[in-house]
Amino acid sequence: MTIAWDALIEDDWRRSREALQDDYDHLARQLGRRGIDIRVVQAKAEAFVVAVPSWGVATGGTRFARFPGPGEPRNVFEKLEDCHLINRLVRITPDVSLHIPWDEPDDPAALRAFAAERGLTLGTTNSNTFEDQPGQAHSYKFGSLAHTDPAVREQAIAHNLHCMALGTKLGARAHSVWIGDGGNFPGQHHVRRALDRYLDSLRAVYAALPDGWRLFIEHKLYEPAFYSTVLNDWGVSCHCARELGPRAFSLVDFGHHAPNVNIEMVVARLIQFGKLGGFHFNDSQYGDDDLDAGSIKPFQLFLVFNELVGAADEGVPGFDPAYMLDQSHNVTDPIESLMVSAMEVQRAYVQACLVDRAALDAAQGRNDAILALAALKQAFTTDVTPLVAMARRARGGAADPVAVYRAGRYRDLMAKERPAPQRRGAGIV
Ligand code: RM4
Ligand code: MN
Ligand code: MN
């Protein structure tokens, strides 16, 4: 059985078009008064893309429990089916990040073709040396790339090389490394030596980076190591990326910072030092909560995009960050969460495009804090909903993706088509 998505998208459009057009016209006039052509901004919205994580389409779970939903994907092909539907409705997520070995294909060419038939690319491989796999020679219990035992480090390096070799067959262009290495207790590991070992291992990974690829390294303050981690913050990450070479960059996962860290500052500094590789978008109240992007601190997301749009406008050399979502869904339908999150990231981007940079520059020059903040707030408080909805519509997506998704009753269908229990390790973190 198939679902008539095109008809559902049209129904939704017919229902909403009049109100939407009205709101759009109003916004066009409002922006016109500020000297902004809505069509120019809409073109930017239409060109915006953010990758979805293959591991995000299944329910995540916590260390306490996992409550799987009906019809969850059981393998990488089914994950791509879900990703395809997401992109079909929102039209800004044509790229999927894969996690190896969770998504290890028997036949890489077949997986690549399966994705391409659905208009999807597989742009980034993510390695996993934070858990053990069946039959593995050495355990990662006490670390991987930074382990004290060279045999464990070799195994972790080999896994990363495998990911990149696989990625070349899948058409990927980047490899992303996050490790769980660190200590749970003071004194457990030698802080400086652990970082030296990590860097030595990463040099071997970097040396094998395929032509035209970028290497992303992802810092994280804590978890699973609760006292100290090897790549603990953006400064250490930036240092390591510099040590490695011009194709190594820092990746910023929003949840990997202490509460109240000024992430837009982190982003600005990495831009300034030529080492911003990309993002794992999500949101959090406390730690690596992996909640939906923009759900807790939408103003922070906007401020990050304010830095990004500012850098793009200025033509900062080498500035080309990769945008990816990295979330774990526990109480929502993962497809809905990923659609909403992608749209929230797009919204923040579009709002940042509305910042009156001349006014902001002038206010900064005069040290006028009130008007500087006002320039940002004017953009942030502009409701761009009709603009992004029209952008979606122009690309063949749904005016209201969640409404269309619910009308299609995809989960009910999948519950019948995907009855088997999910395999362990298939993206459950
Ligand atoms: C980590 C980190 C990585 C992700 C894993 C599953 O906290 O965010 O990017 O691959 O979780
Ligand atoms: Mn991440
Ligand atoms: Mn994380």
Image (tube, rainbow, N blue to C red):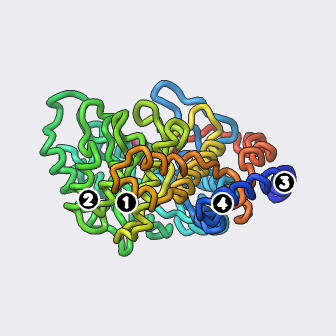
Determine which quarter of the picture holds residue 423: top right
The tag on residue 241 is 2
Tell me if residue 253 comes above or below residue 295 in the rendering.
below
Q: Give the SS element for disc 1.
A: strand
Does label 2 or label 3 sit earlier along the sequence? 3
The structure residue drawn at horizontal position 34% and vertical position 53%, both measured from the top left corner, is: 366
Q: CA distance from mark 2 to mark 1?
A: 10 Å
| Label pair 2/1, CB-CB below 8 angstroms | yes
| Label pair 3/4, CB-CB below 8 angstroms | no
The residue singled out by tag 1 in the image is 277
Point out residue 9 in the picture as x, y percentages from the top left corner: 80, 55
Does label 2 or label 1 sit earlier along the sequence? 2
Asked if residue 393 can be seen in this view, the reply is yes
Q: CA distance from mark 4 to mark 2?
A: 33 Å
Mark 4 lies within 8 Å of ligand 2 (Cβ measured): no
Image side of residue 315 versus residue 103, left or right: left
| Kind of residue at badge 3 | Glu
| Label pair 1/4, CB-CB below 8 angstroms | no
Q: CA distance from mark 3 to mark 4?
A: 22 Å
Mark 1: few/some/many CA within 10 Å (<14, 14-19, 20+): many
Image side of residue 427 versus residue 215, left or right: right
Of residues 372 and 319, the one nearer the viewer is 372
The residue singled out by tag 4 in the image is 91
Mark 3 lies within 8 Å of ligand 2 (Cβ measured): no
The residue singled out by tag 3 in the image is 18
Mark 3: few/some/many CA within 10 Å (<14, 14-19, 20+): few
Q: CA distance from mark 1 to mark 4?
A: 23 Å
Of residues 425 and 394, the one nearer the viewer is 394
Does label 1 or label 4 sit earlier along the sequence? 4
Q: How many marks?
A: 4
